[in-house]
Amino acid sequence: MITAIVLTLVLVLFLVQSHLFNEQVADAKTKVGELDQKTSENDQMKTQTALTKLENETGYSLDPGSVSVEEWKQAKAYSEQFYDDSEGKFSKKWGLFLAYQSMKVDIDPAIAYELLKVETGNTFDPDLTGPETKYGHAYGMAQFMTNTAPWIADMAGINYSKEKLFDPYFSMTLSVTYLDYLYDKYGNWDEALTAYNRGIGGLKAYVSEKGTPKSGYSEEIQEMASLHEL
C-alpha cells in the first residue's frame, strides 16, 4: 500500500516537472522566435536604410522596398569582388549599384561587370570616348552610341542627354536595361552579347557569315563571369 502511494507521488511529481519543463521550453522558443523576428526586422531596416542612402547618392531610383536582406548581402559580396578584381578601379559603390540593378531583372551581375570591363579595356573609365566609326563614337563606361542610347533610356524610364552617357550610374543602368532586353529577345548569352557588341543588325550579319552567334566577345565575357563565385 505504501509502495503504491510512493509510486503515485513519484508519478505525479514527474508529470508536474514534465509540464513545467514543457512550459519552459515553449517559453524559450517564444523568446527565441521574438528575438529572431526582431533581428530580422532590424536587418531589413538596415538594408532599406542602406539602399535609400545609395539611391540618394546616385540620384537613381532603386525601389528600396523590393530587395531582401539576403539579396543586399549578395550585392555587397559582388561589390567586394568587383572592387578587388578591378584593383580598385571599379568602386564598391558602383559594384553595389550594378549588382542590385542586375539582380532586380535576374541578370548575373558578373555578366554586366565583365561586359563593362571589356567595353572599357579594363579601365572602367566613365569618361571614355571610343574610336570613330561610320555610326559615330561610343561614349561612357558602357560605350553607347547616340543613336542607340535614347531609346534604351526611354525603356529604362530615365531621361536622356548625351552628357549623361559619361555618368557611370546612367551608363550602368543603360547597360543592364539593354542586356535584359537582348536576353529576353534571344534567350541566350551568345546572341545577346554579340548583339550588344555588333548591334541587332550586326548580329544577323555575323550569324550569316559565321553560322553561329558565338563570338570572341561573348565567350570572353561568359568565361570571365563564371569565375565570380559567392
Image (cartoon, rainbow, N blue to C red):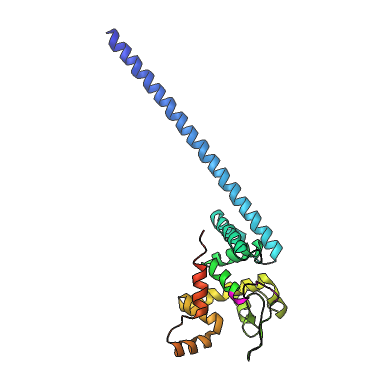
Q: Quick one: 216 or 4, which is closer to the camera?
A: 216
How many marks on residues?
Answer: 0
The location of residue 94, given as percent across then percent down, is 65, 65
Query: Image check: 151 left or right of 16?
Result: right
Please indicate whether residue 4 sits to the left or right of residue 172 in the image: left
Question: Is residue 121 covered in magenta?
Answer: yes
Q: Residue furthest left?
A: 1
Q: From which residue to which does the magenta span run?
A: 118-127
Front residue (pair 222, 27): 222
Q: In the rendered view, tell whether residue 164 sits above or below residue 37.
A: below
Q: Quadrant of residue 130?
A: bottom right
Q: Name the residue furthest top.
A: 2
Q: 21 or 168, which lies in front?
A: 168
Which image quarter holds the N terminus?
A: top left
As drawn, is 57 to the left or to the right of 102?
Answer: right
Q: Residue lying furthest bottom in this view? A: 134
Examine the structure image and report whether residue 13 is included in the region drawn in magenta: no
Q: Position of residue 107 (x, y in %)?
A: 52, 68
Residue 178 shows in the view: yes
- Measuring 68% from the left and 73% from the top, which residue is drawn there? 126
Q: Residue at x 47, y 78 (%)?
A: 190
Residue 222 rendering spot, x and y as whole percentages: 50, 72
Q: Residue 30 in the image: x percent, y percent?
A: 50, 37
- Farthest residue toward the right? 163
Taken as a whole, is the magenta stretch helix, strand or loop?
loop
Q: Quadrant of residue 7?
A: top left
Q: Residue at x 45, y 75 (%)?
A: 188
Question: Is residue 71 depicted above or below 6 in this figure?
Answer: below
In the rendered image, is residue 62 in sight? no
When the figure is inspected, residue 45 is found, relative to residue 193, above or below; the finding is above
Q: Residue at x 51, y 38 (%)?
A: 32
78 shown above or below 112: above
